[in-house]
Image: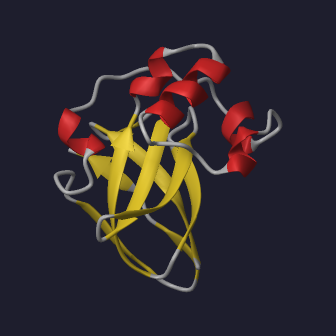
Amino acid sequence: MGVVEGRVLFQSMPLPGGTIHFFQGQEKVGSFMIRGDGTYAAEVPLGPVTVAVENVSVKYQDRDAILKVMKESGFDVDPKQRRPESPANIAAKMSYVEIPERFRHHEKSGLEHVVMRGRQVRDFDLK
């Protein structure tokens, strides 16, 4: 496993909330919350990954509603990130920003990374 952390940007500004999903082939290997300041941290298997970003769930202000929508849509998050004291829930306030739909699909997003052993920083700019 490698630890990938960084920021998700949209139009060169931090994306204020959402979820980042990592895929190897067609298998989703991890889903992690994007904090209100655009940062994320993910533990992902080694090797090449494609990435999808969704933020529709941020439209819902109720945390339980967000988790329910994500689970129903197949974009559940790591159980550790569901705890109220999780950094994902105490960082800057999340707000919805409309992003192009293609970023919700790892095959269309154009977002890729090769995960290596240890910690690495990888920012994703949604252009």
Q: Nearer the viewer, residue 70 or 9?
A: 70
Rendering coords of residue 52 (x, y %): 33, 50
**Image quarter of residue 62:** top right
Visible residue check, residue 103: yes
Residue at position x 64%, y 29% from top?
A: 92
Question: On the picture, is 5 further left or further right than 91?
Answer: left
Question: On the picture, is 107 further left or further right than 63?
Answer: left
Rendering coords of residue 36 (x, y %): 56, 32
Visible residue check, residue 16: no
| Quadrant location, the N terminus | bottom right
Question: On the picture, is 90 further left or further right than 56?
Answer: right
Residue at position x 58%, y 13% from top?
A: 61
Residue 56 position (above or below residue 71): above
Residue 73 position (above or below residue 87): above
Rendering coords of residue 60 (x, y %): 52, 15
Q: Residue most toward the bottom?
A: 117
Rendering coords of residue 106 (x, y %): 27, 54
Q: Residue most toward the front?
A: 72
> How many numbered discs sit on the rendered protein?
0
Residue at position x 80%, y 33% from top?
A: 84
| Quadrant location, the C terminus | top left
- Indicate how the structure is coloured in the image: secondary structure
Residue 116 position (above or below residue 99): below
